[in-house]
Amino acid sequence: MKRFEVVIVGGGINGCGLIRDLALNGVEGLLLDKGDYSSQTSQGSSKMLHGGIRYLENLDFGLVQEALEEKNLWLRLTPHLCFEREFYLPLYTYSKYRPFMLKAGLLLYDFLSHFQNRPHAMLSKAQALAQVPSLDERSLLGAGKYYDGVVDDAKLSLECLYDGLLEGCAQAKSYCEVTQTRKTPEGYEVSFRSLKTGQEETVAAKFLVFTTGPFTDLLLPKLGIPWTPQLLPSKGIHLWLKKGTIEAHGSVVLTTRDNRVVFVIPQRNSILVGTTETPVDQEIFDIRATQDEIAYLLGVLREYFPGAQLDESAIISTFAAVRPLVREEGHTGALGKVSRFHKIYRPDQSSYVLIGGKYTTFRRMVQELAQEIVPRLGHRYRPNLTLNPLRQRSLMPTFGEKPVLTRELLRQIIKTEYVTTFDDLVRRRLSLLEGPEDLKDVLGLPVAEVRSFFT
Ligand SMILES: Cc1cc2nc3c(=O)[nH]c(=O)nc-3n(C[C@H](O)[C@H](O)[C@H](O)COP(=O)(O)OP(=O)(O)OC[C@H]3O[C@@H](n4cnc5c(N)ncnc54)[C@H](O)[C@@H]3O)c2cc1C
């Protein structure tokens, strides 16, 4: 039986971030995921690296400050995967915020970033309409302007994984579902089944870590881990709209009648719109957007952009994911109000569970866990190693100049970026917006030929 110091279950951003941090500190780790890496929540976010301006309302200043520091770090380290974007927050006569309140919030946001954010501005009605010409001008007072980051969420996780694997002491297996665990005097035995071959394998680990996000509450009891449900799973969907559907020279932050926030973020030759926030109790693996949820988002857009052609023909594709929000004692209000703090649990001496938090702060969350595990394994923990740049870049960057996709480049991506299926390739390595079933070609290469690489 193969032995590892740590086995991590779940290869989203938290699992990929953790295997990197552990590997940089010399730990022999194995990461297992039931699907492709980063194919669940960590590819279904609003793709923002942000402090979370609306969490200022919850007085979560510590969380906002930490997230702003992390946002600015990743903007520096991975410019091919993220960039800074202006956000416009329109103010109407009926808006919840008065202009002075917005001004105070934006000032505080800049302050919490240690003034590393590009400075905010308050815009008049004419200035707001010049930047977002599609905006409904009736009752419009003006807008606040501030800056946040846009990220390719799937790819940042992948590059963290590639960086960790370069150390040589870490391994990872995708399409391997963990089906059983057994507590032993030395730690755990972990059994998993390959979803490609059906083959089963058992490995031994001194520590077992779950970074299974919204899947945690359902999975742990099945595996016999002592666990009381901790999550308030909340589904959010997004739309990719055709470029030009809405005329905006930056991102727009809309407040809905039910006091939610919908972001409209131009990127990748398209416009990303999201999100919704609804409780879920069904099977959530590969969850999809429903027609009602799509209609809800289109309805919000029609209110704010009355002149835009907003029907289903404007949609390129949709995606959905479930937030792993941690239940707070006595919480009864809206899901949007639930804190985005993370928690680390220790069900027994040899296991850990990391849940909650935000994508933006993953490095800090996994660091908190790594600095506990690494010394328990007898290694010295060096906290600054994760501040270094990631060493293996995706061959097809998401932003900036892209190489022409040749057959040779495609073969290289498949070989060096741990690609198993056509879906892995088009969605997460090439970051295409159309679903694999809707593609006419793959960046100029015939779909049938590219599919043939996987048969
Ligand atoms: C709609 C929405 C919008 C969001 N927007 C933002 C945003 O703009 N900015 C931000 O900072 N954060 C955002 N977030 C939060 C962020 O996306 C999540 O906090 C983060 O992606 C969670 O990552 P994770 O690694 O914990 O979970 P996941 O990415 O879900 O990873 C868990 C993994 O566990 C695997 N798994 C499950 N069961 C098994 C098993 N039996 N065996 C092996 N593997 C298993 C799954 O396949 C999955 O890959 C958003 C979240 C949602 C849902």
Image: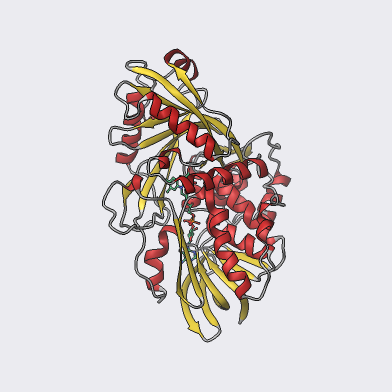
The residue depicted at 63 percent of the width and 57 percent of the height is: 161
Is residue 315 in view?
no
Q: Which residue is the extreme one toward the top? A: 126
The quadrant of the image that shows the C terminus is bottom right
| Image position, residue 255 (x, y; %) | 35, 32
User: Between 275 and 175, which is closer to the camera in this rendering?
Assistant: 275
Is residue 11 found left or right of 292 in the rendered image?
Answer: right
| Image position, residue 408 (x, y; %) | 73, 46
Is residue 34 in view?
yes
The quadrant of the image that shows the N terminus is bottom right
| Image position, residue 91 (x, y; %) | 38, 23
The residue depicted at 45 percent of the width and 25 percent of the height is: 144
| Residue 412, above or below 303 | below
Is residue 164 found left or right of 67 in the rendered image?
Answer: right
User: Between 25 and 107, which is closer to the camera in this rendering?
Assistant: 107
Is residue 436 found left or right of 291 in the rendered image?
Answer: right
| Image position, residue 65 (x, y; %) | 52, 44
The residue depicted at 60 percent of the width and 43 percent of the height is: 430
Q: Which residue is the extreme one toward the left? A: 332
Image quadrant assignment for residue 447: top right
Image quadrant assignment for residue 409: top right
| Residue 58, above or below 227 | above
